[in-house]
C-alpha cells in the first residue's frame, strides 16, 4: 500500500452499550429485605404471643387446680371431724390436724397467682377469712363433742359457712374458666391473624423472588449481549489497530528507504561532483606551483602548502561523509569487511576502550537491503556505546545459527532499563523497525550498571 495515499475515513463510533438495570435490581433486593424482616418480626410476634397465651393458660389452670384442692382440703377436714365425733377415735383427726398448713399453702399459691390489683386476690382474702371461720367452728365442735347448731333445721352455721365457701370457690372457678376461654379465643384470633399475615408476606416474598429471577435472567441476557458487543467492538478496534500499524509500518519503511536512497544520492553527488572539484582544485594548485618562478614560489610556499593541506583535508572529509552516507565497502566487499572497517573507525569511550570483533571469514550472498540494515544496526549500536555507555569493552559479532543470521553488539557500560520509555530512544526504535522490515527480531538485554546486549536475528528465508 502506498503510504502517501489518502488515509481511509475513520469508521463511525459504535452504538452505546446497553446499561444494566442496576436500580431495579437494588429496589427488588431492598424490598425483599424489608419483606423478609417483616416476616421475621411477624414470626417473633406470633411466637411471643403464643408463649404469653400459654403462660396465661398455665397460670389460670393452676388456679383451677388450687381452687379444687382447697375445696377438697376443707371437705376432708370436715369429714375427719365428723368421723371423730361419731367414733371418738382420734385417728380420724389426721386430715383436720394436717389440713390447716396445707390450706395455708394452697391460699398462698392462689394469692401468688393473682396480681395485687386484681379482684380475684380480694376474693381469695375473703375466702381465707371464711376458711378461718370454718376452721374455728370445727375446733369448737371437737372441744364440745358436737357441731354447733347440729339440731337446727338448716344444719347450723357450720353448714352455712361451708356452703358460702363452696359458692365462692365455684364463682372463682367460673371466673377463671371464663378467663381461660377468653384467652383461648384471643389466641385463636391472633393465630388466624398471624396465618393471614404469613400468607400475605409469603406471597409477597414469592412474588419478589419471581421478580428477582426475572431481573437476574434479564441481567444475564444483558451481560451476554454486552459481551457480544464488546467482542465485536474489540474485533473492530483490533482491525483498526492492525490497519493503522500496517500504515505506520509502511510509512516508516518508506521513510527509511527514502532516507537511504537520499543518502545514496548525496553520496554519489559528493563523490562525483565535489570529489571532482576538490581533485581538480588540488591539481590546479600543484600546476600553478610548478609553473611559477622559483623566487615567487619561495615566497608563496607556505600558502601553497596550506592550500594543498586544506584540499587534502576536504577530500578526506568528503570520503568520510560519503562512507557514512553509503559505505563503499558494503557494496564492493560485503557486510563482513564493512563491519570490520566500522569497528576500526574509532576508539570506544574517552579512555580508548577495547573493541573486539567476532566476524566470519565469509557469508552467503546477502541482498543489499539486508546488508545495509544490519550495517546500520551495528553502526547505531556502536555509536550509542561510544557516546553514552562509558564502556571499557565492546564486542561486535556476526554469526549464523540454523536458519538465522545473528548480529550482536555487547558492552560493559552503564546500561539502562528497557522497560522505561524515554523520548530520546529513537535509535533503538529505528533498529527495531529495520529488523521488522526483514521479518526478524530485535532483543535488548540491559540493566543499570550491568551493560547492554543488542541482538538482531534475521531469517535466511527472508533474504532470498
Image (tube, grey):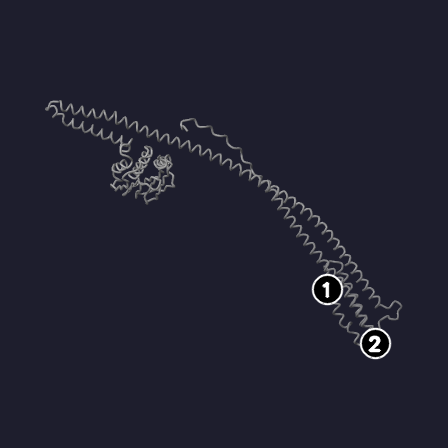
- Nearer to the camera, 32 or 190: 32
Q: How many marks?
A: 2
Q: Residue under circle 2?
A: 87
Q: Quadrant of residue 60?
A: bottom right
Disc 2 or 1, which lies upstream in sequence?
A: 2
Q: Nearer the viewer, residue 7 or 60?
A: 7
Quadrant for residue 442, please give it. Answer: top left
What residue sits right under mark 1 in the picture? Answer: 109
Q: Quadrant of the N terminus?
A: top left
Q: Secondary structure at mark 2?
A: helix
72 over 346 or under it: above or below: below
- Relative to 402, 75 lies left or right: right
Give the x, y percent position of residue 289.
Answer: 14, 24
Q: Position of residue 12 (x, y in %)?
A: 50, 30
For mark 2, does the 10 Å Cα neighbourhood hold few (<14), some (14 to 19), or many (20 or more) residues? few
Up the image or down, 138 lies above or below 448; here it is below
Picture residue at 28% right of the left edge, 33% below the top: 330
- Left or right, residue 177 beside residue 422: right
Mark 1 crowdedness (10 Å alpha carbons): few <14, some 14-19, many ≥20: some
Q: Is residue 137 above or below residue 360?
A: below
Q: Looking at the image, is 393 positioned above or below residue 96? A: above
In this orientation, which residue lies closer to the viewer: 259 or 425?
259
Q: Position of residue 21 (x, y in %)?
A: 58, 39
Q: Quadrant of residue 181?
A: bottom right
* Residue at 50% in and 35% down: 233
Q: Secondary structure at mark 1?
A: helix
| Identity of the residue furthest to the right in this view | 153
Q: Which mark is residue 51?
A: none
Q: Position of residue 64 (x, y in %)?
A: 76, 62
**Distance of label 2 from label 1 (alpha carbons):** 35 Å
- Which quadrant is the C terminus positioned in? top left
Amino acid at each position: 500500500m502506498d503510504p502517501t495515499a489518502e488515509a481511509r475515513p475513520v469508521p463511525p463510533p459504535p452504538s452505546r452499550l446497553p446499561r444494566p438495570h442496576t436500580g431495579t435490581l437494588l429496589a427488588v433486593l431492598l424490598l425483599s429485605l424489608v419483606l423478609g424482616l417483616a416476616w421475621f418480626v411477624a414470626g417473633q410476634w406470633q411466637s411471643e404471643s403464643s408463649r404469653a397465651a400459654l403462660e396465661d393458660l398455665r397460670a389460670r389452670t393452676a388456679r383451677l387446680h388450687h381452687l379444687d384442692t382447697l375445696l377438697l382440703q376443707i371437705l376432708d377436714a370436715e369429714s375427719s371431724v365428723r368421723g371423730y365425733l361419731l367414733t371418738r377415735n382420734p385417728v380420724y383427726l389426721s386430715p383436720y390436724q394436717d389440713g390447716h398448713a396445707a390450706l395455708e399453702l394452697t391460699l398462698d399459691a392462689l394469692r401468688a397467682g393473682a396480681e395485687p390489683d386484681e379482684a380475684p386476690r380480694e376474693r381469695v382474702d375473703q375466702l381465707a377469712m371464711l376458711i378461718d371461720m370454718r376452721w374455728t367452728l370445727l375446733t369448737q365442735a371437737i372441744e364440745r363433742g358436737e357441731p354447733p347448731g347440729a339440731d337446727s333445721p338448716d344444719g347450723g352455721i357450720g353448714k352455712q359457712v361451708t356452703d358460702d365457701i363452696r359458692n365462692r370457690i365455684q364463682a372463682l372457678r367460673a371466673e377463671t374458666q371464663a378467663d381461660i376461654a377468653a384467652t383461648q379465643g384471643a389466641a385463636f384470633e391472633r393465630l388466624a391473624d398471624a396465618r393471614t399475615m404469613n400468607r400475605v408476606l409469603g406471597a409477597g416474598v414469592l412474588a419478589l423472588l419471581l421478580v428477582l429471577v426475572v431481573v437476574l435472567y434479564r441481567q444475564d441476557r444483558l451481560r451476554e449481549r454486552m459481551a457480544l458487543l464488546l467482542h465485536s467492538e474489540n474485533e473492530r478496534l483490533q482491525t483498526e489497530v492492525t490497519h493503522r500499524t500496517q500504515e505506520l509500518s509502511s510509512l516508516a519503511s518508506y521513510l527509511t528507504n527514502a532516507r537511504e536512497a537520499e543518502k545514496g544520492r548525496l553520496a554519489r553527488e559528493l563523490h562525483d561532483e565535489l570529489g571532482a572539484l576538490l581533485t581538480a582544485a588540488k591539481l590546479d594548485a600543484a600546476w600553478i606551483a610548478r609553473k611559477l618562478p622559483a623566487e615567487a614560489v619561495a615566497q608563496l610556499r607556505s600558502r601553497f602548502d596550506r592550500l594543498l593541506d586544506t584540499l587534502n583535508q576536504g577530500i578526506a572529509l568528503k570520503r568520510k561523509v560519503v562512507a557514512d552516507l553509503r559505505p563503499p565497502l558494503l557494496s564492493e566487499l560485503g557486510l563482513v569487511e564493512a563491519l570490520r572497517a566500522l569497528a576500526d573507525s574509532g576508539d570506544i569511550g574517552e579512555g580508548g576502550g577495547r573493541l573486539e570483533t567476532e566476524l566470519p571469514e565469509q557469508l552467503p550472498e546477502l541482498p543489499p537491503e539486508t546488508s545495509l540494515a544490519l550495517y546500520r544496526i551495528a553502526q547505531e549500536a556502536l555509536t550509542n556505546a561510544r557516546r553514552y555507555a562509558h564502556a571499557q569493552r565492546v564486542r561486535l559479532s556476526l554469526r549464523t545459527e540454523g536458519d538465522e543470521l545473528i548480529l550482536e553488539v555487547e558492552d560493559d557500560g552503564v546500561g539502562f532499563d528497557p522497560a522505561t520509555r524515554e523520548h530520546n530512544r529513537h535509535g533503538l526504535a529505528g533498529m527495531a523497525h529495520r529488523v521488522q522490515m526483514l521479518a526478524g527480531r530485535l532483543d535488548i538485554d540491559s540493566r543499570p550498571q550491568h551493560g547492554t546486549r543488542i541482538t538482531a536475528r534475521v531469517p535466511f528465508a527472508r533474504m532470498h
